[in-house]
Amino acid sequence: MAISSKSSLRDVLADERAVAIIDEFIPGFMDKADQFGPVMGMKIGMLLKFPQVGLPKDQVNALLEKLDGLDA
């Protein structure tokens, strides 16, 4: 399955390349995986824009750009 900024969190977490990209921007991201249940179906692009994620807009955009480039 192709991974992009429109992929669900569930699909993103199933791709090791995508997890590595997220970990670049959010170190320790997978340490909180047990809390992801309620948002597993959400699109990663939407999820990363939540203020709770704590990433500035430019970093969110850079992360999403890298995800979009995985299968381009």
Image (cartoon, rainbow, N blue to C red):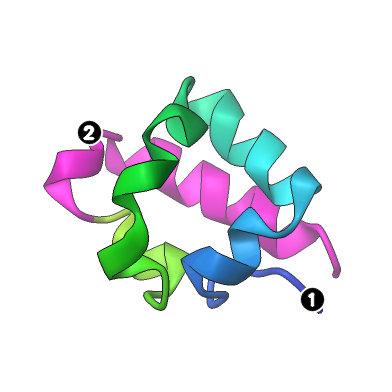
Whole-number angstrom distance, CA of label 2 to CA of label 1:
26 Å
Q: Report x, y in % for residue 30.
A: 50, 34
- Residue at the spot 15% in from the left edge and 42% down from the top edge: 52
Q: Residue at x 54, y 45 (%)?
A: 63
Give the position of the N terminus as an image quadrant: bottom right
Q: How many marks?
A: 2
**Left or right position of 36 against 25:** left
* Image x and y of residue 36, in percent: 35, 54
Circle 2 residues within 10 Å: few <14, some 14–19, many ≥20: few
Q: Nearer the viewer, residue 50 or 60?
A: 50
Disc marking residue 11: none
| N-term-proximal mark, 2 vs 1 | 1
At mark 1, the secondary structure is: loop
**Which of the two residues, 50 or 12, is positioned nearer the viewer here?**
12
Find disc 1 in the rendering and name its residue: 2
The magenta region covers: 50-72
Where's residue 31, x and y in %? 44, 28
* 24 sits to left or right of 72: left
Left or right, 70 with reference to 12: right
Q: Main secondary structure of the magenta part?
A: helix
* Residue at x 51% of width, y 74% of height: 8
Q: Which residue is mark 2?
A: 54
Q: Residue furthest front?
A: 34
Q: Residue furthest top?
A: 27
Circle 2 — which element? loop
Query: Decide: marks 2, 1 in contact (CB < 8 A)?
Result: no
